[in-house]
Structure formats: structure tokens, C-alpha cells
Image (cartoon, coloured by chain):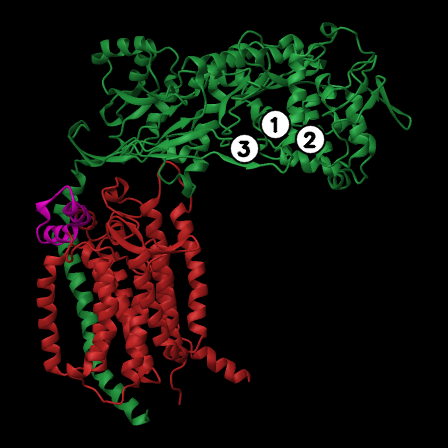
Amino acid sequence: MQQLGRKKVSRLDFILPTISLILFLIGMLTIYSATYNPVTVSWLTPYGKRQLLWFCLGLVGMGGSFAIDYQFYQKAAYLLYGFTIILLVLVLLVGKTSMGATRWLTVGGIAFQPAELTKLTVVLALSRYLAERRLPPPYNLKELLVPFALVGVPFLLVVKQPDLGSAMLIFLISFAVIFYAGITRKTMITLVAAGISVAMAGWHFLHDYQRQRILTFINPDLDPQGTGYHIAQSKIAIGSGGIWGKGFLKGTQNLLHFLPEQHTDFIFAVFAEQWGFWGSLVLITLFIIFLLRGLAISQEAKDAFGSYLAVGITATFFWQVWINIGMVLGLMPVVGIPLPLISYGGTSLLTSMILIGILLNIHFRKQYF
Amino acid sequence: MSVADQKAKQEQGSRNARLLFLVIVLAGAILLVRLWYLQILRGEYFNRLAKNNHIRVRRIRALRGVIYDRHRKILADNHLGFNLSIIPENISDIEGLARELVRYLPDLDPAAIVNKFKQVPSYLQYRPLKVKNNLTRDELALLEAHKPDLPGILIETEAVRHYPFDLECSHLIGYLGYINERELQQPAYEAYYPDDLVGRSGIEARFEDLLRGTDGKRQVEVNALGRELHSHVIREALPGDNLVLTIDIDLQSCLYDLLKDKVGSAVAVDPHTGDILAMVSTPSFSNNMFATRISRADWQAINSDPLKPLQNRAIQGQYPPGSTFKVIMAAAALEDQVVTPATRFFCSGVYRLGNARFRCWNKYGHGEVNLSRSLKESCDVYYYNLGSQMSIDRIAHYCSLFGLGKKSGISLAQEKPGFIPTSSWKLKRFHDQWYRGETLSVAIGQGFVLATPLQMALAYVPIANGGSYFRPRLVKYVEDRVNRQQRAIEPAGRRLPIKSNHLELIRQGLWRVVNEPHGTAYRMRVTGTGWEMAGKTGTAQVVNQPGPRPKKGEEIPWKYRDHGWFVAFAPFRDPKIVISVLVEHGGHGGSAAAPIAREAIIYYLQNLEEQ
């Protein structure tokens, strides 16, 4: 009995939680420096306090998503998927509109964005479908019709809101899972070609502010006071950090409030200004280890569903990290995607921790010989 | 599904996983290359840009919403004020400047200025530092004339809250105060800055979130000396909402003038809507003193005044209602069928319960008294009889219907609930049962009973209008200052479960108080106006003063004198105003409070006719 207990403990993954905790602590430190007020100094800013509260809630969510055997998720996958579709339809019918977009549902006074949930449930449904399929991979276009439909319906519903950032993430994450499951080379080429032509056709359907963002991304000097101003200031912040950074709480761009959304979407700029190239190197390396660990878990999973799910979750983190930092570095257009575990924001932190819980779950229940 | 199937899928996956591994590492490498380009290759360039960043983001303060009375006369708005600031980075000799400034503004403390200056961190040197608020015209002229001798000073303009009717409405409108450090830490004050003012009492506090508005942002380009070159609005400031109150400022001023030399309170209500027409509390203070930093001496004078001018007696003063309470007793007794309109009790001037003697205010007695006459002549013995036959909990039930013993829910902070005793309260508080003798005190509005002037006015509303109690309404509508949209706040009334013939009987009794000889307020009758007034006097004992009671009111020391009450409504046939007046230590209600109510009613109804 005792031996079994020890065995169970040894089956727990320690790398992933440790890295996650370090990333969260870096996030807390950076949120502190981004929101700290030199006039009224205290060891925790109101933002820091709330982030810490969400972290506690996240621990509960993580424990929950870890404790339930992930094969239960497989059974519930389609049900959760259907539920999400209903929520997305509800958003379009009765959702709360703010700044021209309808993204929020309010239940009992608490507002949330179903698009956030959609990322996970699409991965679940997709993983179950691909895992239970009798046909062996690789698949061609015709054989992928059902997965396309599974992704396409929620994708279009989210585009309609419009929440282009989330829609893009759903598409990219799903693509990663389908690619991992295996597709023929011909399909791959067709898909990429189709993606590019859809993007070009989609330009006509974009809202003005969305076009503006892309245009100023291509040429930031076009509109130095508006959207481009954010990218320009963010580049100044990061660049002026140099090799060694300006030091903790000494980022002038941050203190003078040049940075937009400095505690949420642009938090990486605050970090890079203070800690310079070496700090950024450490942070990005931590993220790479985190992602590779997620990929490794997918390889150790005892069944196909577990491995698809792990890939989907890893892809969720990958795209968010890459798009967020790419945006702050001026490599990508400005889209509102937070940096997982670092940015201030309860929903993002809670979701990230639940996803980490599922990864640990898959690792814990892998095949042991 | 077969195990072989699983195997095939996982093998296919692990082939692709190698590709994904590469993608992750490659993507990380792209980010690092970009970082290397920005931070190392071009680090110097960006560092120079950061140092010379001439763009500053400054705040545009939102204008606070205007407060109007019901006829859109201004009760609170914003005036232009001038502040003296210094720009730290432009000053080489702060001690010298401070000495120089004191020559023109003698009330400044040079040490404090130097101290403040030294605390400014290096990266905030460009930001103006406030030295003195609200300069007078003379100070302004003096400083402008000597500006060349005072390098580094800056005269800034700022909106200053102004109250045209400060003494008349200071309790109602309230005042502003500077936000403190503890509040700044709270998420609720996220949008506030250290120098901001927030509503501290009255309407200003209760509607802070509506009145405040949303600050804007302005981007300014500055030169190396911190002087603004170009300015460009990023986000317009959104001014706060305007509030249109139910108050009639003419009536409010009239009541204030009548009460200003006394200590007391008056509340006037529209009996058809529950609108608060006036709410006065004296002694008063000027809320304009708080609009800029209040001086220490002023604050101490207000705070240490034994008469507590900051207290809003209309909602915070809790007094025994005395005989004005008899109206509720009468309604309760009729409704519970303890008496009929014809029931008579004999008043000999004293009522005996066991060994105790309860006196009527008229020691010679009233003789045979029915309900109507008991109100008219305010016979105490009649109500002792009711009290001896009713339970305290039934009385409390009727009090609750009339809004006594609980907060009215008026839109003002710190309202007091008054008090109505019950038997269970007595048991809990004193571990003792309720005695019948105590009910007798309650029956004439003494004992434990406490009510605010607002509550007494509201309790008389159902009697005036024939049976509907209203939740008091103070804000008629909220007006969005940007798009001029108005959000009305509807009156909230409910019918009381009391028969209308019972209320009518009480109404008649209150008519007789004023309009029949021997009524306790007969001297207050209004003639020659085409309408009549009805009302009830009340005299509330303060304490059992030591020693034998002197005969004449004037011989009693002020602080032992009784509180005088008068609650009235008019015109009798179709009431348009209910008013309650309380004068602390005013003596008998008929002589202290009634003349004030009478004059205010005449003023209000005449004004109404002219319109």
C-alpha cells in the first residue's frame, strides 16, 4: 500500500508545475512594476492582490481538472462541444455589446466570454473524433470533412461576434491537432494555399479598426498617434532595455505611462525594459521548456486521445505566447491576446491553470510498465 | 477500436511530433533574434529615443456634474480657480524661490515647499507641483506682476466646485474632500489620482459615481524644459451626469431663514409623489469651504462646535416625537377596533395605573374626550387609555407601516433609523419583560420612541393624501451631460392597509387642531387665503430635569427645555405640501415650531399660485 503511494507520487510530473510557478512569479513581479504607484507605495498593488486571488482560484481549477480521469473528458467531449455551440449562439442573440463587439454573456451578474471556452472544447471534440476514427492516418481532404465542420462552425460564430483574435487562435490550434494526427502532403499544400486566399478575401469583410491595425503594423509611421504609437512605444521600451536592462522598477517608458495596456497585453515590454536581453532570454527559454514538456507529455500518453489533447493544449500555449510576444516586438499586428501566466487578468490565468491541470492529468495516467 | 489502430495513430503522431519540436524551437529563436536586433544591435538608438521621449501623457480632468433644484436653479456647479504650481526641473534655487514666494503669499510655509520639492523623484521632475490652491484675484495679480522674479512658477487653472446656496443646502448637497492614501489603494478608486476630490457627504457622496465623470487623456509634446509644444487629445474627458433634485430652493431658503437662529430641522414633502421639497438643518456651515483644501482653523471650529453643525438633523437627529405620534396611535387603535370614533374616556388631568400616576399636560383635565377631540386638544389621558389596552408589538406593527423605526431609504448616506421598541427587543436588551406602564409612555410619543424629522413628515403623508405611503424621492432625474438623455426616477408609493374612513377621521381631528377654538394650534390658523391648514403639535421631554419644575418656560435653562414639534399639511381639501418642523429646546411645539411651518406653507402655496 505504502509502496503504491510512493509510486504514485513519483508518477507526478514536477518540471511543468515548477516552470509554471516560476512564470507566474515573474508575472506577479512584472505586474507589480507595471502598476506600482511611486506616490503610494505598498508591497502589493490592487492588481497584484486580485491576480493572487485568481491564482488561488486557479489552483482549485487545476486540482479539479487534474483529479478527474481524462478519459471522462473523452466521454463528455461532444456534449461539452454542443454546449459551447449553444453558448456561442446565445452570445449572438442576447450577448452584451461593448465597443462594437458582442462577446460577453452575463449569468447571475458575472460576465464571461464563451470564446475563451471554445478553444478547449473544440480541441476535445477534435481529439475524440480523430482518436475514435477507424481509418488510419494520413488523411486527405475528403476524409477531413468532419473535422473541418467541427472547427468551422464555432470559428464562424466567433468571427461573427467579431472576435478575430480568438477565431484565429481556434483555427491555429485546430490546425496543429489535425496536422499532428497526420495529413497527406497534398492536403497540406492545398490547406496553406486555401488559408492565404481566404485571408485575402477576408480583407473585404474586416472592420475598419481591424484593417487599420494591419495597415499600421505594416507601416507604423502611418499613424504615429494611434495604433502605430503603441507599437513604436513598445519597441522603444524593449530596445532601450539593452543587454542588462534598466533594473527593477526603473523602466522609464513604463513609469511615464508610455506603454498601452502595460499590465495586460503589453506586459512583456515592461519586463524586457527592466531586465534587458538576458532577462528576455531567460523568460523565452522558460516558455520553450514549458512547451517542449507539453509535447513530451503528448508522446507518453497511453492512448491517441490523450496525445491529441496534449498537443492541442500545448498548441494553445504556443500560439498565445508567440503571438503576444511577436506583437509586442512588432513582428505581428496588435491583437488582444494576453501572455499566459504573466499578463494581469483572471480569466486568462484561470484557463491556463486548468489546461496545465489537464496536461498533468494525461501524464499521471500514462502507461507504466 | 483495436490496439493496433491506436499504435498506428501514435506512431504517425510521433513522426509529426519531431516537426512540432522543431517549430517550437525555431519560433523561440525568431523571437530571440528579434530581441537581439532591438536590444543589442539597436539598443543604443532606442535608449536615446527613450531619454528624449518628448511625448507626455497628461490627464484631462472631467468636469463634475451640475446639481439643480426642481426648477433647474443651480445648487452646485464648477467655477474657474487658479493654482500656483512650480516645475521642479526648471528650478535651481528652491530655498531662494520659497523665500521669495512668502513675500507675496505670507500664509505659505517655505520649509514645507522645500520639503515637497525634495521628495519629487527624478523622473517626475517635469511634472508641475502644486503649492497653493485657489488663489484670490489679488494674489493672482501680484504673482503675475512679479513672474519675472519667480522663475519656475506656473499658474494653473482648475475647476473648483461652487455652491451658490451654501448655508441653505450644505447638509443636503454635502461637500468634497481630498482622497486619502488608503482609498487610493482600493480597486473602487482605480480611476482616481492623489490630488482628486471625492464626495464626502450628502448628494455629493451618494452620487459620486454619477457626478464624477470619466477623465480624458491628452498627449503633449514637450521641449527639453518641459514646456508644452503641441497637445493632442487621445481621449476626451466625459463630464459627469447632472442631477435634477426634487428640492424647491425658494422654499428651502425660506425655511432656512426661519430656522437659522435656532437649532432644529424642517422637512417638506409633496404628498402626491413623496418628493422632498425642502430639507433644512441648523446650525449650518458653508460647504464652499471644503471645495478647496479647508484651513485647519475652520475645520476645528466646525468640528468642535457643541451644536454639531455637520450633522444633518433631518435624517440623523433622533428625537422623541411627543404628541405628533398620537396620530399613529389613533390609526392603530381604530384599525384594531380598540376604540370606535364615538368611544369616550374621561380625563381628570391624571391617569392611574397601579400606584403610578400619569399626568395629562392639562392638569385641570379635559373631561369627556372622544378621538377627534383627543387630537384637537392633544389629551394625554385618552392615549394612556389606548396604551393600556394595546400591546406594544401591535403599536410597533403600525409604526412600521408609517415608516417609523426604520430607514426611509432616502438617497443620502448616514440616515438614522429612529427607534420603536418591541417586547422582544426589551427582553434581549435588558433581559426583562415589557411593562404596561412603558406602553403608556410610548402612547404619547415618549419612552423609548425616537423619530427623525424626515420620518415624521413621511408618516403624515398617508394622512394628508388619503392612505398612500411614499418612499422619499430626492432626485427627479439624472441627465447625461454628453447626449442630454434623461433618466427619470419614478415616485414609489404603496397603499396602507388602513380604512379610509379612519384616516378621514384623523384628518378631521388635525383640522380641528388649527381651526377650532381650544385647538392646540388655534393661534396658527390661516385665514383669508381660500385654503386651510391642518396639523399636530408636539412637545418632547428632553430629560427629567433636576429639582421641582419651574412654572414658566423661559425660566428653564436652555438645554433642559423641551423640543417643539409641528407637523402640518395644506391646503386641507387637496394637500400639496406636508411639513415637519422640529426646534431643539424650543419649548411647546405650538409656539416654537408651528409659526415656522405656517410661514413656509403660506410662502410655498402663494408661490405655487403665481406660477
- Classify mark 2: residues with Cα within 10 Å, few (<14), some (14-19) or many (20+): many
Quick one: which chain is green?
B
Display colour for chain A? red
Q: Quadrant of residue A297?
A: bottom left
Tell whether B422 sits left or right of B504. right
Q: Quick check: do tags 2 and 3 share a chain?
A: yes
User: Mark 2 or mark 3, which has the lower sequence index?
Assistant: 2
Observer able to see residue B237: yes
Amino acid type, callout 3? Phe
Q: For the residues marked 3 and 1, what is the alpha-carbon distance in whole angstroms? A: 12 Å
What residue is pinned by disc 1? B463
What is the chain identity of the residue bearing mark 2? B
Q: Which residues are magenta?
A: A208-235
Amino acid type, callout 2? Ala
Q: In what element is the residue under mark 1?
A: helix
Q: Residue at x 42, y 12 (%)?
A: B610
| Residue nearest the observer in this picture, B129 or B159 | B159
Q: In what element is the residue under mark 3?
A: strand
Q: Which mark is residue B470?
A: 3
Q: Residue at x 63, y 38 (%)?
A: B497
Q: Which mark is residue B331?
A: 2
